[in-house]
Amino acid sequence: MSRDEEYREGTRSVHLPRSPELASDPLVPPVVHSSTFAFETAQEYADVLGGRKPGFSYTRIDNPTAVTFANAVAALEGFGVAADVAGEAFGSGMAAISAVLLAFTGSGAHVVAPAACYGGTFGLLRNVLARFGVESTFVEGNDPAAYRAACRPNTRLIWGETIANPTLAVADLPALATVAHDAGALLAIDSTFASPAVCRPLEHGVDLVIHAATKYLGGHSDATGGAVVGRPDLVAQVRAVRVDTGGILAPDEAYLLHRGLATLPLRVARQCTTAQAFADALVRHPRVARVDYPGLSDHPDHALAKALFDSGRYGGCVTVTPNGDQATGMALCDGLRLARIAASLGGHHTIVSHAASTTHRQLDEAALAAAGIGAATVRFSMGLEDPADLIADAEQSLDAMP
Ligand code: PLP
């Protein structure tokens, strides 16, 4: 009797033929949705779960599509690094950041971070980890000497951002690595604003690189995810926290983010060229008090950016502070016809956000001032539109401001 005759309808519908073995190599990674994986024997299941045998057991622990994405980010960030580089994928940038902070701190530990760090990171350190006995010192500016002065015997981690949000200050990665290592701490860098198409921090002595893959890596504002890459023994500790806290990247998101990587250099090169032209044009506008862009020759970190970044690439974001107050900054956003008012950055649409009321709302007035963020400051994340159209759009909004 055939199997079909042996079993009843419900059973036959569940136990359908298996997927074929992939004898040839699919050009793009398959999306493996399965949340669980079956074994021939109980021993094999125990061995895979116990790490004694390679394989997949449960998607929260490891999913093939998420692993493919994590390995790809590790390869891009690890280019030019002699040592092995490992990667882990996360469900969001904040899931990646939390896992790193939880992996290397604990009650009694101390973290040094920039006052201008991403609002979510700031909130996590100040509001959440503080309740678990992790102390943080927020350093104003990006002088490595100030980071050194902030270190204590219990400093476990120095946090930084390759390009800070929204001030676009550039971190002196080699100097910060020396400060961290002298203090017996690790240097963890959120490189979301740079992406490996602008800078690869591992080349400059950084221990761990973190990405909100939601931004440039994905590049199309249609997937949320994060990644952590670095030395395999350190990444293994981050992975252990990821497994226990459950922040794995979903398979569909992993597929989209992985697809984004193929066009990362093309997109980012174009976004950098547009950002440079946009910054060059807006510094000349009479309603603009300040333009922050590391590609401007009078930017305080221009020389550092030139030394650390790939040639001619200074990032795809430009921060514009018009003369005026919060209402002025919001009016600049409201007057734009092409750039969209929206959260996030790094996608193909040009997006603006008024920093003090949105991305940095967690910072009070003193913290905003310490971070160098003005009441009117607006961040532009340049998309893939034509630069001349974007410049004309910003100029007409500035001209029309009350
Ligand atoms: N790091 C930076 C620099 C960011 O700008 C963001 C989000 O805007 C994050 C981390 C958090 O990423 P996600 O929103 O994917 O959690």
Image: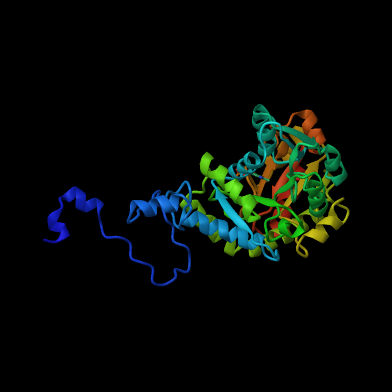
Q: Pick whichever, 123 or 388, lies toward us.
A: 123
Place of residue 35 in the rendered image (x, y in percent of width and height, measured from the top left): 40, 48
Q: Pick whichever, 71 or 399, lies toward us.
A: 71
Residue 129 drawn above or below residue 187: above
The N terminus, quarter of image: bottom left
Place of residue 401 in the rendered image (x, y in percent of width and height, measured from the top left): 76, 40
> Can you name the residue that lies furthest to the bottom here?
24
Q: Is residue 140 left or right of residue 39?
A: right
Q: Pick whichever, 181 or 343, lies toward us.
A: 181
The C terminus, quarter of image: top right
Q: How many marks?
A: 0
Q: Is residue 128 left or right of residue 365?
A: left
Q: Quadrant of ligand 1?
A: top right
Residue 359 visible? The answer is no
Residue 369 visible? The answer is yes
Q: Pick whichever, 5 or 120, lies toward us.
A: 5
Place of residue 358 in the rendered image (x, y in percent of width and height, measured from the top left): 67, 36
Q: Is residue 66 left or right of residue 212?
A: left
**Which residue shows up at 80% across the image and 29% down it?**
366
Q: Quadrant of residue 367?
A: top right
**Which residue shows up at 64% across the image and 65% down it?**
266
